Image (spheres, rainbow, N blue to C red):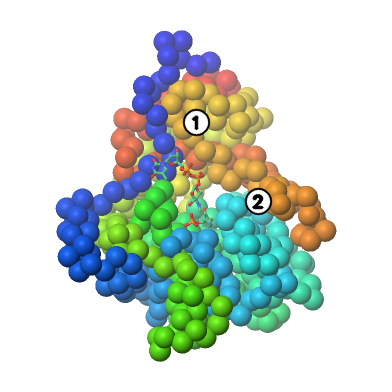
């Protein structure tokens, strides 16, 4: 099944190869920081925050050292406390649940819509109990949650709604940028995200009180008048990271064009391969196509996702089964069903069993994609 002459690619092709912006602009910014001798939480961070607020059409942005810390600070700044239960989707990266669990908030796992992969509002409503205080939706792979329905649900049950928008920068919901929904949304700018700041994140919100609390909480709870108002953490962003984030944001249109072209090319290259489909973004919305995810229907393809993943890896296509196992199937959640949703979550698990992320982004060429598509065609037994 694999190439008898050796792997298809001599060099590994990674999922998550960083998109790099203009190196000269980045270097200039770093030189500026060195000249100013201001290395963290300074003018570049402020500029990055202003740019993010503008791109997302939000009133306030608080840059963070990563999205995991961002979710924690956003939860605390929104009034959630240890012992509260928050509804989260089962299909997500483990950071969504860990962020809450780490600060004593109990993630209660809900099933997802099988097509969008986002939290199912109907299932979420059935899981609301006396300790439920919030919903943390995830715009998984940039596909927006059912925001209007979640807002309505939260209004009826007096819940805080937060969004893990780690994948969502540059995407829209009903034509408006992801970022301005719920009490707050949290972006990730990890190296392998669409926009990156090496590591980084940001909380965006239209709520001045939440923004003020988040700003203080990321800096040990210190308010602008230098008083410690409440418990905080250290989740500040460095000037170097902000320099990268700003440079990356400037190149967003180029990244978008590359990702869109890659998505089209994979779709064409994989057309007609039995049991293989490219996941699509939401109809009528702007998408960043940060992740190129295929679904493998083992019965139709004649090969399971895990085997395809193994064979691709042998050929130096380092695909990733994002997100398998589903979050609720991972420790420490899998062995605490008493504290979480009744298991199983069939749609989240079915999705987790089929998905496979393939290399995309600016580091991948059209020829690479053609070769990866041809390789998959050859590896799928029912396609021969
Ligand atoms: N919520 C959601 C829904 C998320 O997906 C994430 C993170 C978060 C919250 C939390 O955001 P942060 O706290 O990270 O800001 C990665 C990332 O570490 C993680 O940020 C991301 N989601 C998750 C989906 O993927 P790994 O362990 O799979 O990544 P890693 O480091 O193995 O890299 C993946 C591939 O990228 C490798 O083949 C190598 C390549 N790579 C990686 C890096 C770092 C490069 O080519 N260059 C690089 O610099 O978790």
Q: Residue at x 18, y 60 (%)?
A: 31
On screen, residue 275 versus residue 234, left or right, reads right
Disc 1, ligand 1: is the CB inside 8 Å? no
Q: Is residue 309 visible?
A: yes
Q: Residue at x 19, y 55 (%)?
A: 27
Residue 139 position, x and y percent, is 53, 60
Residue marked by disc 1 = 272
On screen, residue 231 versus residue 196, left or right, reads right
On screen, residue 180 versus residue 296, left or right, reads left
Residue marked by disc 2 = 327
Secondary element type, mark 1: loop
Residue 285: image quadrant is bottom left
Q: Is residue 171 visible?
A: no
Of 358 and 240, the residue lying toward us:
240
Around disc 2, counting alpha carbons within 10 Å, would you say few (fewer than 14), some (14 to 19), or many (20 or more)? many
Q: Residue at x 66, y 62 (%)?
A: 101
**For residue 306, above or below residue 196:** above
Q: Residue at x 33, y 53 (%)?
A: 256
Residue 229 position, x and y percent, is 52, 86
Residue 116 position, x and y percent, is 57, 54
Of 308 and 217, the residue lying toward us:
217
**For residue 359, above or below residue 254:** above
Disc 1 versus disc 2: distance between alpha carbons? 31 Å
């Amino acid at each position: 099944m694999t190439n008898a002459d050796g792997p298809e690619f001599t060099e590994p092709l990674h999922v998550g190869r960083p998109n790099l912006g203009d190196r000269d602009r980045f270097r200039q910014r770093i030189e500026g920081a060195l000249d100013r001798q201001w290395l963290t939480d300074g003018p570049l961070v402020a500029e990055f925050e202003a740019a993010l607020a503008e791109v997302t059409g939000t009133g306030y942005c608080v840059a963070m050292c990563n999205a995991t810390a961002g979710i924690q600070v956003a939860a605390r700044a929104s009034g959630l406390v240890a012992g509260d239960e928050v509804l989260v989707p089962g299909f997500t990266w483990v950071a969504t649940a860990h962020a809450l669990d780490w600060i004593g908030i109990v993630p209660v796992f809900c099933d997802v819509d099988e097509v969008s992969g986002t939290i199912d509002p109907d299932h979420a409503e059935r899981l609301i109990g006396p300790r439920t205080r919030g919903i943390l939706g995830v715009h998984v792979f940039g596909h927006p949650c059912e925001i209007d329905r979640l807002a309505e649900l939260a209004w009826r049950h007096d819940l805080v709604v937060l969004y893990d928008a780690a994948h969502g920068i540059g995407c829209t919901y009903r034509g408006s940028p992801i970022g301005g929904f719920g009490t707050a949304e949290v972006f990730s700018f990890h190296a392998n995200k669409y926009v990156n700041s090496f590591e980084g994140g940001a909380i965006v919100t239209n709520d001045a009180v939440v923004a003020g609390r988040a700003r203080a909480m990321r800096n040990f709870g210190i308010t602008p008048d230098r008083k410690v108002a409440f418990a905080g953490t250290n989740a500040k962003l460095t000037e170097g990271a902000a320099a990268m984030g700003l440079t990356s944001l400037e190149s967003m249109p180029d990244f978008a064009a590359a990702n869109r072209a890659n998505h089209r090319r994979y779709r064409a290259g994989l057309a007609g391969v039995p049991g293989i489909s490219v996941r699509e973004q939401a109809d009528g919305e702007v998408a960043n196509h940060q992740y190129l995810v295929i679904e493998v229907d083992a019965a139709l393809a004649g090969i399971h996702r895990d085997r395809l993943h193994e064979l691709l890896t042998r050929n130096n296509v380092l695909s990733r089964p994002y997100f398998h196992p589903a979050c609720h199937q991972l420790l420490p959640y899998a062995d605490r069903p008493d504290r979480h949703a009744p298991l199983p979550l069939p749609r989240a698990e079915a999705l987790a069993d089929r998905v496979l992320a393939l290399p995309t982004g600016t580091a991948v060429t059209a020829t690479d994609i053609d070769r990866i598509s041809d390789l998959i065609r050859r590896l799928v037994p029912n396609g021969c």
